[in-house]
Image (cartoon, rainbow, N blue to C red):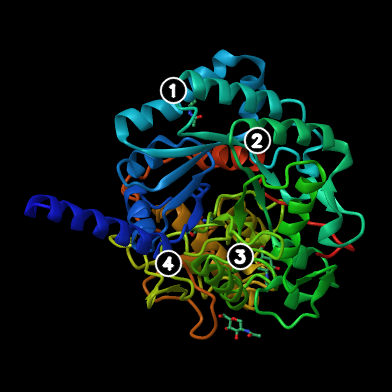
Amino acid sequence: MGLYNYTLFLLFWLCIISQGFLAKGVFGLGCNWGSRSTHPLPPRIVVQLLKDNGFNKVKLFEADPAALMALGRSSIEVMVGIPNDLLASLASNVNHAVSWVSQNVSTFISKNGVNIRYVAVGNEPFLKSYNDMFTQSTFPALQNIQAALIKAGLGRQVKATVPLNADVYQSDSGLPSGGDFRPDIHDQMMAIIKFLNQNGAPIAINIYPFLSLDADPNFPKEFAFFNGSAQPVVDGSKTYTNVMDANFDTLVSALEKNGFGSMPIIIGEIGWPTDGSSNANVKNAQRFNQGLFDRIIKGQGTPKRSTPPDIYVFGLLDEDAKSIQPGNFERHWGIFNYDGSLKYPLNLGSGKSLVAAKGVKYLPQQWCVMSPQASTSDPNFAQSMNNACTYADCTSISPGSSCGNLDPMANASYAFNMYYQTMDQRKDACQFNNLSMITKIDPSPSQGSCKFEIMIDLGKHETNSTPLAAPLMMMNSMVMLVSSFMVIILLSGWI
Ligand SMILES: *[C@@H]1O[C@H](CO)[C@@H](O)[C@H](O)[C@H]1NC(C)=O
Ligand SMILES: *[C@@H]1O[C@H](CO)[C@@H](O)[C@H](O)[C@H]1NC(C)=O
Ligand SMILES: *[C@@H]1O[C@H](CO)[C@@H](O)[C@H](O)[C@H]1NC(C)=O
Ligand SMILES: *[C@@H]1O[C@H](CO)[C@@H](O)[C@H](O)[C@H]1NC(C)=O
């Protein structure tokens, strides 16, 4: 073997070895990047945040062009979502799907180098609370999107799937082994699963131990966590120590029962919120997410499936413009605050820990507060509070939340400030019938986790002319976009 050949040979083995090493050391870490925020973090900062923390997969709820552009050439795997309100149109005509794929997928792959790997058709379309609104359109929409992907030459590279809520399956026996699909949508589920299987696509499922706990005061809290001290649940030869495993394996059983036992599964959403309810706090969120990250890093599967699923954590950032119909916690699912700052540390393995977003610009250090001369018994007080909390996020002053123990004056200050910040510190946004004033002294309490926010600077605060109609319209469309709420009533009602 000549020197040249020998060098090539060495290089070859080095590649094999380093790839083997990578395959072991690099794990799939995914997250959901939602954008229902009055002050969304600039996409290029978000993409850097993803990279800095080793996220190599991201799920978007819609084909937001700015987010997709920023993800271009990042090599991060992207799942692009299709909102439920597009399903009927996509189901009705394959040409609609062809143009959707062409505009929202093909272009970004070919022109911007976005690594799109999945299209998520709808978002939890079979949620019981939707009352079958999307039940008929989901499967035809999936078929048309798949056809459009094949037509665009992307049939291998991009897989179409449907992110489903865990309430599509249940267990009559109360144990994971008793899992099967909900009778009312059983036929739809079978059609979808068969189709996904034919196309080599995975099934995607959202699992929320927090919601099980929040909805049921008798839920064994320790069972929600991965290192809890709950009494294990024994199911034949399997033993369950946490709700995620039990829930996931209920799906595995449902798939087995219907002849698709080896179907790949993605966990499309899983996480824990930090505010807006008594179980939603930093301590619980850190405990849950650390347990989750530990499993992802270790590549740990469930009792029935030793290979771990791809997991997309919900979510990356807090979103202050999400509908709070599911609960006040809905705006606080982020691992990070809305601005990419840290809520709590997380150990990412190999001695690394979570790092905050870089290069974020803030509005000036000033707050709008209740003026000391004003009184909560002022006839205009209730109306002012109501205005503030209609247009800005007051979920952190709800009972049990991080600012739930403020006195009434401070409570009002919190609301006035949120409005003022949400309106980009416009002067006229701190004029609550003369009840308010601007201060440069941080009004946040010195103890506890209650924080009076300063919003990020989106270059809007100089323009004094933003009409109120804009935020109002935005709020309306948010309410339409009912989010991912569901109660996982499974396995004797609490798993
Ligand atoms: C995607 O493509 C369709 C064309 O079918 C377009 O109407 C839509 O606005 C695009 N963007 C998103 C976010 O869906
Ligand atoms: C569980 O893990 C969390 C986070 O790693 C840790 O703070 C907590 O003490 C652990 N709890 C138990 C019961 O081991
Ligand atoms: C604070 O304001 C919120 C929103 O108006 C209200 O629900 C809550 O009861 C108030 N709390 C106190 C202590 O005044
Ligand atoms: C606020 O105070 C100013 C000056 O004291 C007064 O002229 C104005 O009428 C007041 N506005 C309201 C809405 O009470």
Callout 4 secondary element: strand
Q: Residues within 10 Å of mark 2 (few under 14, many from 20)?
A: some
Which residue is the site of mark 1? 153
Which residue is the site of mark 3? 273
Q: Nearer the viewer, residue 422 or 230?
A: 230
The answer to whether residue 147 is visible is: yes
Q: Disc 2, ligand 1: is the CB inside 8 Å?
A: no
User: Who comes first in sequence, dot 1 or dot 3?
Assistant: 1
Q: Residues within 10 Å of mark 4 (few under 14, many from 20)?
A: many
Q: Nearer the viewer, residue 245 or 64?
A: 245
Which residue is the site of mark 4? 367
State how far apart marks 2 and 3 are (Cα): 33 Å
What percent of the width, then of the height, locates residue 224?
71, 71
Callout 3 secondary element: loop
Q: Nearer the viewer, mark 4 or mark 1?
A: 1
Residue at left offset 48%, top offset 75%: 344
User: Who comes first in sequence, dot 4 or dot 2?
Assistant: 2
